[in-house]
Amino acid sequence: MRNMSLTAIAVIVGVSFATAAKAEPQVEVLHWWTSGGEARAIQVLVDDFKAAGGTWTDMPVAGGGGDAARTALKARVLSGNPPTAFQMKGPSIQEWYEEGALSTGIDAIAKEQNWDAVLPAQIADHMKCEGKYCAAPVNVHRIDWFWANPAVLAKAGVAMPTTWDQFNAAADKLQAMGITPLAHGGQSWQDATVFEAVALGIGGNDFYRKAFVDLDMDALGGATMVKVFDQMRKLRGYVDPNFSGRDWNLATAMVMNGEAAFQIMGDWAKGEFTAAGKVPGKDYLCAPTPGSGYLYNVDSFAMFDVKGDDKVTGQNLLAKLILDKKFQKVFNLAKGSIPARIDVDLGEFDYCARRSAYDMNVASSNGGLLPSFAHGMAMRNAQAGAITDVVTRHFNSDLSSADAARLLAEAVQNSL
Ligand code: GAL
């Protein structure tokens, strides 16, 4: 101490004052992860945040797919009281940025951790607002999956289908035995989830891209779309009488308990099987729905433009923890998805996750890596809403396939 210069002492004292004055990281996180698997997954982030000295205020708004949470978010932003972070996806990130609601403050963390080098470019692009990171990705969910109960399939002597015709034949057989072929929850986002998987399989990758990425009117209202609706009509005949309004995780439970054979759902359904201690290949089966594409859905936390050092520090800490390699592993083991980072070892992941990663790679090299419209990755909200309305209306009425395809194109046209 005796030999220390006054400047050195001043620096040390200055540093400790700065540390003492440094704001405690705070976040208030709005999300909809309330099912068994979802809650386990978000808890990983909550625990990490608290362990790093932060205070987490949880704002869950129940409702699969997030419609209710998004309504709550709008109300919060309109009243001038946005949350620190929201589980947001796809183009709506840029839509909220254009409204002036988001912050790009975490870009400094992204540079420090070199996110550009560890995220696939397609995912990184979704996270950026005018070239800077405004959201942090936790995962990649695949949408186009069948989840099935192997004992039920064996009882009916049916195999995992690889075409929609095979699926229909299997479903007819199951139904004749008094087994519900398809566990489904009649909520519009679930109808849209099934619809996009069907569209990918029946129309193929180029058709899907034309219809749901380019919003090409001929694809939206044409003959292939009529066939897609024909298959949706078939599926409507394979659900049980109580499907209306059912939550997606209850539909997953029907497959788990052997009350139904199949569910078509994104791999958050796997989070439910995992939470129940079920093992893929033994207790349940996963397989991509027909087709050669891959529908992706990236969950991420977008950062709102909030005041206060504690909140800004909280956003930076959140961003840093989200991109941590270990977090990406542990979170995704629970969520059913795969890490957004490309350098996480998948050794501890199950067959379904490894299949997802493999197929994603293949799809990204053959033009089949396609954004899910049902989960807000492909287009703006107005168009996605317009399509979803027609899909749900068709599913719940006797609207003909031809009329549905025509209405689909009209609805998108009117929403532009
Ligand atoms: C999706 C979301 C998933 C899952 C699902 C059901 O939109 O990306 O993480 O939570 O909804 O709630």
Image (spheres, rainbow, N blue to C red):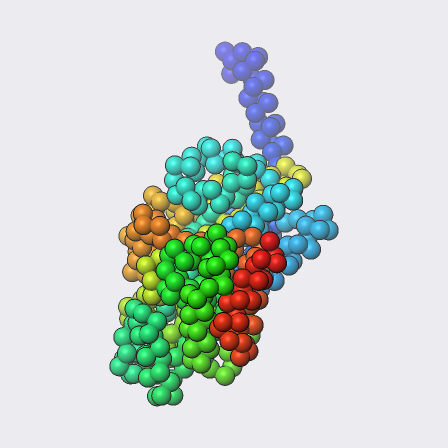
x, y (%) of residue 71?
A: 64, 59
Going by the image, does 128 lie left or right of 382? left
Looking at the picture, does residue 396 appear above or below residue 31? below
* Mark count: 0
Going by the image, does 332 lie left or right of 158? right
* Rendering quarter of residue 289: bottom left
Residue under the image location 54 percent in, 11 percent down: 5
Q: Nearer the viewer, residue 319 or 238?
A: 238
Looking at the picture, does residue 4 appear above or below residue 88? above
Residue under the image location 32 percent in, 79 percent down: 169
Q: Nearer the viewer, residue 32 or 232?
A: 232
Q: Is residue 415 visible?
A: yes
x, y (%) of residue 156?
A: 29, 83
x, y (%) of residue 152?
A: 32, 80
Going by the image, does 67 lie left or right of 193? right
Q: Is residue 43 visible?
A: no
Residue under the image location 65 percent in, 44 percent down: 99
* View extreme (right): residue: 79
x, y (%) of residue 263?
A: 41, 72
Looking at the picture, does residue 386 appear above or below residue 8? below
Residue under the image location 71 percent in, 51 percent down: 78
